[in-house]
Image (cartoon, helix red, strand yellow):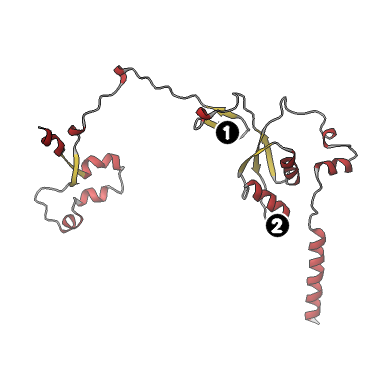
Amino acid sequence: MLRIRTRNLHTTLSKFVRNSYPLKPSSITGTAKKLGFKNAQEMYPEYPLDETPKLWMIIQVQRLKYRPYWEKEAMRELGLYSVNDVSIQINSPNMNEVLWSIKHLIKIQPIRMTQGEPTKDDIGYTQLKWNGEFEIKTKIQSNDDPKNVVPIAPEEEWKVVDGFRMCNNCRQKRCLAIQMCQKLWFQQGKNNLERIGPQLFNFVENPLKHRKT
């Protein structure tokens, strides 16, 4: 009797889950006809923007756990897997149909290019804000005035590294094992390498300097 009751319980639960599973939403035009409109444009007669945006910035705001498979597949096509993931898509009828089916999982922001569309020279100097504003940063122009150029010493004057520093007449076993002063060895993990470098290495004169002389 206990097995029969548990089996009946499982069947009723499966039927309940099957009936409560959300149905696949219809398209934009299908939804408009259900609401009594002829097309989708009649649902939104007043366009909120002055110009039609070319790109959408899509932000995921809901988790995909316990969501139907068609919503998960649509989100994966857009490259959205977790909350706060961002995807840039083209404003096209096919893409808008996909966004309509997952509109409850995402937040859509139109990308506004107030400074115009970027060019090849603007690569690396752009920023996309969370409100959809696309900003082009100004480049730093270099001044080729010879008065402002820092003089660089010739290569023969550069000092080279000749091993690590050790104390004079040092006979410590640890220093001899690591081939450097043990005090500097323990400091390299705590201090910045650029700061400890002059103390860590042993610099000598460049041999190219003696060859040319």
Where residue 37 sits, quadrant-wise, is top right
Left or right of 74 in this view: 37: right
Label 1 to label 2: alpha-carbon separation:
32 Å
Q: Position of residue 6 (x, y in %)?
A: 78, 76
Circle 2 residue: 66
Q: Residue at (12%, 33%) from the top-left corner?
A: 212
Where residue 130 sits, quadrant-wise, is top right
Q: Is residue 130 above or below residue 66?
A: above
Q: Is residue 116 above or below residue 67?
A: above
Q: Residues within 10 Å of mark 1 (few under 14, many from 20)?
A: some
Q: Position of residue 152 (x, y in %)?
A: 25, 27
Q: How many marks?
A: 2
Q: Position of residue 105 (x, y in %)?
A: 70, 46
Left or right of 122 in this view: 167: left
Dot 1 or dot 2, earlier in sequence: 2
Quarter of the image with the C terminus in it: top left
Q: Position of residue 66 (x, y in %)?
A: 70, 57
Q: Residues within 10 Å of mark 2 (few under 14, many from 20)?
A: few
Q: Residue furthest right?
A: 36
Circle 1 residue: 128
- In front here: 37 or 168? 37
Left or right of 198 in this view: 63: right
Which kind of residue does numbered mark 1 sit on? Answer: Leu
Mark 1 or 2, which is nearer the eye? 1
Task: Provide the secondary structure element on which disc 2 rests.
Answer: loop
- In front here: 123 or 82? 123
Where residue 204 sits, quadrant-wise, is top left
Quarter of the image with the N terminus in it: bottom right
Dots 1 and 2: beta carbons under 8 Å? no
Q: Residue at (62%, 24%) from the top-left corner?
A: 114
Which kind of residue does numbered mark 2 sit on? Answer: Tyr
Task: Provide the secondary structure element on which disc 1 rests.
Answer: strand
